[in-house]
Image: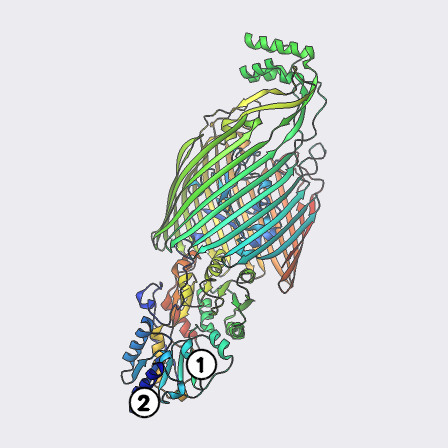
Amino acid sequence: MSFGPRPKRPLLLLTALLSGPGLADDLFVDSQALPQVLTATRLKQSPAAVPGSMTVLDNELIRSSGARDIPELLRLVPGMMIGYGAGNQPTVNYHGSNVNDARRMQVLVDGRSVYRAGLATVDWSDIPLAMEDIERIEVFRGPNTVSYGANALMAVVNILTRSPADSHGTRLKVTRGQRGINDWYASQGLGWDGGDLRLSLSGMQDDGFDENHRGQDYRDSRRLNRLGLSASHTLANNQSLEWQFSAKEGSDQRPYTYKPVFPYVTAAGNNADVNAKDYAGSLRWNIDFNPEHSLYVQGSAQHWEREQEWRACDAALSFSPQLTQLWRLNPNYAEQVARNITSPLPAGNSEERALAEQVQQQWRNGGSQQVCGDIDQSTRETRYDIEVQDTLSLADNLRLVSGANLRYDRADSQTYFNGSLDDSTWRLFGHLEWRASEHWILQGGAMYEDARLSGNSLTPRVAVNYLITPRHGLRAVYSEAVRSPDMFENNVNWSYRVNNLEPGAFGQRNAEYFVKTRGPGDLEQERMRSRELGYNGYFADAELSVDFKLFYDEITGMISEPLRNNQYIASNSNKARFSGSEAQLDWRLTPADRLRLTYAYVDAWASNPADRRLSATNSGSAGWLREWGDGWSSTLFYYGDDALNQYRFERLDLRVAKRLRWNRTSLDLAGMLQQRLDDEPTTIYDNRYDSRHVLSFSAELAF
Amino acid sequence: MRRLRHWLLLVCLWPLGPLSASEILLTGSQDNPGVRSFVDALREQRTADQVRFIPVAELPRPSQIKAATRLILLDSASLEWRLSETAGPAALALRVSRVQVQQRLGNLRPAYLSLLWSDPPLARQLRLTHYLLPQARRVGVLYTEHSQFLLDELRAAARPLGLEIVTEAWPDLRDSRPLQTLLQNSDVLLGIDDPQLYNSKTAKNVLLSSYGRQMALIGPNAGFVKAGALASTLSDQDDWLAVLGQLLDQQPSRWPRTLYPAQFSVLGNQQVARALGIEAIDPSAAAIALAEGESTP
């Protein structure tokens, strides 16, 4: 008798979950006690089940794009409008709004908001984070204050850094190129039983744009150095601790832009450069009570320091107490008087005219003398934030994420706040995911937020996903979101104190400039209502993933007055509306070729024309990544916006790289060429380059 | 005292020998509910035979056990005991893995030993991978010096399926670079049942890193499916009882030197499948599909 033939039936069939009592005592199953790692609380929705539009920029894309900073990388996200105030002042807006400020998007680094506490902007160049430390960027295209807090008004950029456990070894990288490109990066990662740590140091330098519209050298270069420490510790089988510390120091050049109010002033300062220092620290404690219940507590502290001292010159009359009084009485009238100091007085009431006559008298009696002095326009902002988030899987098809957040913001600035100002905000949020059937997923939630300076708000969000198959889903989303006015918009108390006046003015060496501006103090939150229909699908055979969406977003109570120190009257009186469609496609054509396309059509309308300038009607990107074999690879990207602030933007980026490997050591050499396909300035008329192309090279050694 | 117990045991066993030709002696380092339930089940199945369990510590040397006894070894301690002497009855070694035996015996296959592998056969795991993720072409495999010997076999099994095996040695588990490199270069991870690589300490790192890249882990064993692997094949007690039923019906001289059980089932983690956007796993359909693809020896 021989052994076999093998009986094909009956095959013992098991249920999907191992928790059945039948297997618990089985001598042949599960002999070792393993922790449940991918639990219901840790697993996220598949792309087709996400309640909104998401673009994930993965490691491969980040690396092969050759982008030196985050805004350039975000060109790969459909609907993202990248502009430049100057070479060192990139602005990123989703769908649009103002050229000068990007205040309507939440930006997080590992769950910590880097949105500045006082002047609610994101200083992209100053975020203390090296590109090389980024693992992935998840961009949630649409409002989501429920998950990310107020200010997640138009989109959320969630930057996830590489985990210390994945950063072992040494990496050294240098990049050199035209336009003064001079970047470096060094990191060392190590692990021990129960912990991992990464230290990274990096620096960046470039000249920014070459010239302004008059062909003069443009003062917008940047230079910075950063330090980052990231560690994780396993405290117990179900508990871990993660902490990070990062710091950045650098200088951002700013041109001298002050234009004297009074005639005959010939002297001027030569720059208004900023020294920027950023510090951030965070600590996160994760605890898994059981596979169905987990919680984290995250605390963070951040400090932004912008040292900006510059020398300004104008007539001594700028410090006239009478002119200051006139400004308080009627800023418009005061400005007319000042700008036409040698002309007859404009019409005004008797009090105004009396003061104006005194001012004119002062002009004739030495007030026209040119004086120069130092202005300290520095700001220091601090934020402390603590958040608790609980994830509870109530059933196999029901999950609840809830939590609370407490935040304290403080801003110090003599110029902007005449001292310091602080605010505290608390927030409660809850989000429920219900997988009603194999095909239907209902997700919804709400956030309640109360800020001391700007009041409270409740924002709901609801989404329905219909999964045709697990990899193909249709979605309909309605969400509301708010943005709190920042301290600057609402509570600015703007005046320039000029020190070391030479010669003195009105017998003083230190005096207050006559222009003073105060914020209204009663601004309300901006409110967004967003509607979206979308489709997300992955065709496994073709390895093609597709996302498509139609959107209709309205912002009401919009604060869109420019932040200027003469006549800044902020209000909630503006509105904007964005509608259109977006598509993204990621296709692995062959194992060696990856094709990626994004496109956005945005129809923008805004009651304030300034708010629709940064909306390109047609924008997008096309990329082709290829591995040629033998360590050679290439990336070709096209980026295009038909009109950003009226200027066309089209660029082709080519990166060719060669990887050399010896055992565990690898050397990556890459050359990158950026070729502008148009001759337009970038975003604003002063942002111009001498040449349409820029070339850079990088070498990275890892061992 | 211990010697006395051995002696008494021998006295008890010896006279029974000639009367009962089908004496089945199971042994292992310890008696526990799992062992007891298995011994009971075997006893129920082999009513004509005398089935008993004696802890290995209480057994005399193998050569002192009657030659006609059919030995069933339930763990590595009992395997060690049987290996201590060439003389003695033939034994079926259960719950031993390829990696474990390779470390202990290398390529040596003693004639008195029939090794019944506990780890899921790699060819079957590969077919499961191909069945669940038909678009995955590059199968990433981590190995240590102890499991390296399996790679050639794995490559041979991958060829007819059109799969490419991408390998990476992971000698120092505190340094995850090999894992990262592998994740970058493969479409799916296949776990080899090598306890140095896949254990309670490494589970978190491997599973979180692969999930972070939206990549599934197949195997290395059923325990890992609960921890977060997508799926694995497994043979449980009933499958092994069927194997033993056939083997015990034969003369020990006909026992194969090594054997993977023909009967198996598929275990899938539906939550993980859902999160990866994979169709819900139908374990029965998967098992049938895999069994149909297996070549008859």
Q: What element carries label 2?
A: helix
According to the image, label 1 marks what residue? B258
Compared to residue B240, the image places residue A667 above or below, namely above
Compared to residue B28, the image places residue A534 above or below, namely above
Q: Do the residues labelled 2 and 1 touch (CB within 8 Å)?
A: no
Q: Can residue B296 be seen in this view?
A: no
What's under tag 1, amino acid-wise? Answer: Thr
Q: Is mark 1 on a helix, strand or loop?
A: strand
According to the image, label 2 marks what residue? B14
What quarter of the picture does the N terminus of chain A occupy? bottom left
**Image quadrant in which you'd find residue A418:** top right
Q: How far apart are marks 2 and 1 (CA)?
A: 30 Å
Please state which of residues A615 and A332 is positioned toward the viewer in this rendering.
A332
Q: Are marks 2 and 1 on the same chain?
A: yes
Q: Furthest-bottom residue in view?
A: B18
Q: Can residue A301 be seen in this view?
A: yes
| In-image side of B35 versus B103 (left or right) | left
Look at 48% across and 69% down and name the residue there: B192
Q: How is the image coloured?
A: rainbow
Residue A494 coordinates in the image, percent (x, y): 56, 25
Tag in front: 2 or 1:
2
Residue A207 coordinates in the image, percent (x, y): 69, 40
| In-image side of A479 versus A216 (left or right) | left
Please state which of residues A306 and A672 is positioned toward the viewer in this rendering.
A306
| In-image side of B2 versus A307 (left or right) | left
Residue A587 coordinates in the image, percent (x, y): 53, 56
What's under tag 2, amino acid-wise? Answer: Trp
Q: Which of marks 2 and 1 is nearer the N terminus?
A: 2
* Chain to which the residue tagged by mark 1 belongs: B
Please state which of residues B98 and A533 is positioned toward the viewer in this rendering.
B98
* Chain to which the residue tagged by mark 2 belongs: B
